[in-house]
């Protein structure tokens, strides 16, 4: 117990210190006071970096990440602009895929199997979920490839490795935005009007991004650890997809299982989004809390896991 | 308070050749997990660097030399924080800009302008400071006309120029450069060297890896010679480079056969048909020759074909890789197929100053002083690089900058061949 506390404490201090440092104007003075101890009589105040072995787990070094925030944007922007430069129809492809699956789902599940949809028109019910799922799936796909596609960067330049999984999350946001606005535009055709619940929309979008970030960290970390992981990812994603209320409403899940079911962040997000936009019944407070907590926990553990593995990737690839 | 820019203390780096338990594939990992990870594999470590200690002052330019696999790149990777050391530590003052490879992070679809910003951000620079330096970068690369063209349409030279321009023009306190000068044309190379000199005068510290001994000597005051991950020598550039060249030439002669295999691959050389079989220095005192003493070599040459008009040439190269002198034999050699002959070569007026030398033995078709008319048949870089040792007659106060060779007589070609026995 004592050892655990001794481990946690410096991490917490370091992270807090990092946040403080980045907020402070006289950064280098504070940095030397908080992060680097004064020892060996070396004048630490003049920007001395120590390079040494870092074994095992370590803090997230958020201050350093903050210093590199521009790189995150630039990497994301590089992917976005190169993608849309290549094809004039870029935006069109972004819509086509979710739209196609919504049509198939509406015909097969909505019309033929007659899956209940909490009184929401099935195409809208499916579309609201598919666009979120599409986002997470795109991030997951990109995160398994990111280590190999940026191997040149990793072996030749230093930067906080967390920049990579974070920058992955941003480009698919463009597609998400396009799909989301398409959904909003199509609402009047289905005679669905906005309610007061719509103000919660940003909350669920943020939760969705947190979920995508945790997926990105976990998957790229696992892809470093095991190079045959890419055979497992599609299976994992499929399992996750069917355990999320994408094709069916949460009301089909037995009452006593719903809280556990809500530990899947996607369930809280999708239920919440349908409440915000489509006028579905409001989600249960405990369920939203469960989803939020599990998303945040997944993010923190994923980031720590990635951080730990990223120290050795330069030697591996 | 010390004014170091870079201090390395007992730095070591090991690579686990078998890989740790965690790494590898899931398929291999799952059974291990079942065994409880108890049986730890005996790891096979490769020490890429071991116990390195040195210090570089601010504004110094340090050359890193060593053979392939000596650990140069590993050291640069550790210093640019791409990889962690296994033990020991390094202290770095200020921002480090590393140029381990030119054009890292360039995206082919983006324009040169966009790539400058991207590449700058990857090297850890703020967008504002890149904006300030932007014109300077573009001018240095000489790409004013093409800056808005996607990089994929650039020639490889333009690509490299832009990449180097970005890294060299950013405000870093320490610049790490790895063999980038090997690419790019001659004017650009000289501009790069100029830029590095300029950085040095601005008080920046430069770490520089190169195989080109000449550029190392001109650019750097201090050099560090790495051998098998260990610090072999560290100090003034010309001394360290001399030791490196001597070492590497001795090593390259250890296996005469391998040397010859390499010459065989050269097109147009008939090294496999007519070649040196053995070259031996005849000296009573190992590699040492007193100043003014004659130099004697025994050479064995074999031929599988009819060969006429073969010429033999010796070129002397000093410890810094500069040619000190050459000599031609007046005699021509004639061989019948399957013949193996042994010769003794004596150079009577070897007026080389004190120092270590290596010798190139060149067997060529045709004789004369017009080198272009000669075709090289076989060539070996040969050492025991003899060492001219001090003696009372040796010139005093001779500096290496004045040229390594003293030509007291104008000709260096008093060579006598004593045709030894003919072994059929």
Image (cartoon, rainbow, N blue to C red):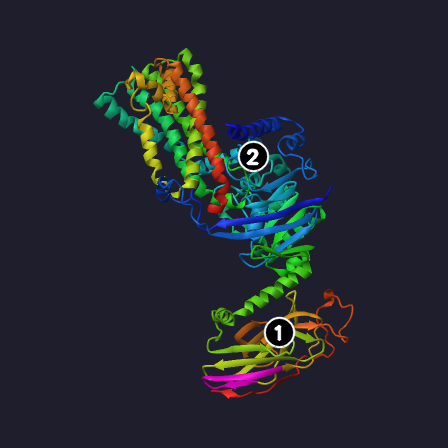
- How far apart in space, not on screen, are marks 1 and 2 (Cα)? 55 Å
Residue B362 position in % (x across, y down): 56, 75
Up/down of A262 relative to B89, above or below: above
Q: Secondary structure beneath disc 2?
A: loop
Q: Magenta region's main secondary structure? A: strand
Residue drawn at x 57%, y 83% is: B343
Q: Kindly tell me whether residue B224 is visible in this rendering.
A: yes
The chain to which mark 1 is attached is: B
Q: Tell me the residue that label 1 is attached to.
A: B315
Up/down of A254 relative to A78, above or below: above
Residue drawn at x 66%, y 31% is: A33
Q: Secondary structure beneath disc 1?
A: strand
Residue A42 position in % (x across, y down): 69, 39
In the picture, the disc for residue A68 is: 2
Over which residues does the magenta segment extend? B332-345
Category of crowding for the residue at label 2, using alpha-carbon neighbours closer than 10 angstroms: few (below 14), some (14–19), many (at least 20): many
Residue A239 falls left or right of residue B173: left
């Amino acid at each position: 117990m004592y050892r655990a506390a001794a481990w946690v404490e410096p991490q917490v201090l370091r992270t807090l210190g990092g946040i403080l440092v980045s907020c402070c104007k006289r950064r280098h003075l504070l940095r030397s006071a908080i992060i680097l101890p004064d020892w060996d009589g070396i004048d630490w105040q003049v920007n001395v970096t120590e390079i040494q072995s870092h074994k095992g787990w370590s803090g997230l070094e958020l201050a350093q990440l903050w210093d590199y925030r521009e790189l995150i944007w630039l990497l994301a922007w590089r992917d976005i602009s190169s993608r849309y430069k290549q094809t004039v129809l870029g935006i069109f492809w972004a819509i086509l895929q979710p739209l196609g699956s919504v049509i198939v789902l509406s015909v097969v599940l909505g019309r033929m199997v007659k899956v209940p949809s909490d009184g929401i028109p099935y195409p809208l019910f499916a579309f609201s979920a598919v666009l979120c799922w599409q986002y997470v799936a795109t991030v997951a796909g990109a995160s398994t490839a990111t280590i190999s596609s940026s191997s040149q960067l990793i072996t030749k330049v230093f930067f906080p490795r967390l920049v990579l999984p974070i920058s992955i999350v941003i480009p698919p946001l463009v597609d998400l935005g396009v799909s989301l606005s398409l959904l909003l535009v199509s609402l009047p055709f289905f005679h669905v009007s906005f309610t007061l619940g719509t103000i919660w929309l940003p909350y669920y979008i943020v939760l969705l991004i947190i979920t995508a970030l945790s997926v990105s960290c976990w998957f790229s970390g696992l892809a470093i650890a095991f190079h045959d992981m890419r055979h497992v990812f599609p299976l994992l994603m499929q399992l996750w997809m069917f355990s999320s209320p994408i094709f069916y409403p949460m009301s089909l899940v037995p009452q006593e299982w719903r809280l556990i079911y809500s530990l899947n962040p996607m369930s809280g997000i999708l239920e919440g989004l349908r409440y915000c936009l489509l006028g579905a019944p409001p989600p249960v407070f405990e369920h939203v809390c469960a989803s939020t907590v599990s998303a945040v926990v997944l993010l923190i553990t994923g980031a720590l896991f990635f951080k730990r593995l990223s120290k050795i990737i330069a030697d591996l690839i | 308070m010390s004014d170091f820019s870079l201090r390395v203390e007992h730095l070591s780096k090991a690579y686990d050749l078998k890989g740790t338990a965690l790494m590898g594939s899931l398929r291999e990992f799952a059974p291990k997990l079942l065994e409880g990870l108890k049986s730890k594999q005996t790891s096979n470590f490769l020490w890429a660097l071991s116990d390195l200690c040195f210090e570089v002052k601010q504004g110094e330019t340090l050359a890193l030399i060593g053979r392939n696999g000596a650990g140069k790149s590993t050291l640069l990777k550790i210093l640019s924080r791409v990889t962690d050391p296994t033990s020991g530590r390094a202290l770095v003052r200020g921002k480090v800009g590393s140029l381990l490879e030119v054009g890292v992070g360039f995206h082919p679809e983006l324009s040169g302008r966009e790539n400058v910003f991207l590449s700058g951000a990857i090297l850890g620079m703020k967008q504002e400071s890149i904006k300030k330096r932007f014109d300077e970068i573009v001018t240095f690369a000489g790409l004013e006309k093409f800056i808005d063209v996607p990089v994929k349409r650039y020639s490889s030279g333009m690509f490299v120029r832009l990449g180097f321009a970005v890294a060299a023009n950013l405000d870093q306190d320490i610049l790490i450069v790895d063999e980038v000068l090997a690419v790019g044309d001659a004017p650009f190379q000289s501009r790069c060297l100029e830029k590095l000199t300029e950085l040095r005068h601005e008080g920046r510290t430069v770490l520089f890896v190169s195989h080109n001994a000449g550029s190392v000597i001109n650019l750097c005051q201090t050099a560090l010679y790495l051998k098998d991950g260990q610090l072999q020598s560290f100090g003034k550039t010309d001394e360290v480079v001399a030791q490196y060249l001597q070492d590497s030439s001795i090593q390259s002669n250890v296996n005469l056969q391998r040397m010859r295999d390499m010459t065989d691959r050269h097109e147009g050389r008939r090294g496999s048909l007519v070649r040196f079989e053995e070259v031996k220095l005849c000296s009573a005192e190992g590699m040492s020759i007193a100043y003014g003493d004659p130099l004697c070599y025994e050479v064995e040459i074999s031929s599988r074909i009819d060969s006429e008009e073969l010429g033999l040439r010796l070129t002397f190269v000093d410890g810094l890789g500069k040619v000190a002198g050459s000599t031609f034999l007046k005699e021509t050699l004639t061989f019948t197929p399957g013949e193996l002959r042994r010769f003794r070569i004596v150079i009577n007026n070897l007026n080389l100053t004190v120092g270590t030398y290596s010798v190139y033995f060149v067997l060529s078709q045709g004789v004369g002083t017009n080198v272009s008319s000669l075709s090289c048949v076989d060539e070996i870089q040969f050492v025991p690089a003899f060492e001219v040792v001090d003696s009372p007659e040796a010139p005093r106060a001779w500096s290496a900058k004045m040229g390594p060779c003293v030509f007291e007589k104008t000709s260096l070609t008093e060579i006598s061949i004593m045709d030894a026995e003919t072994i059929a």
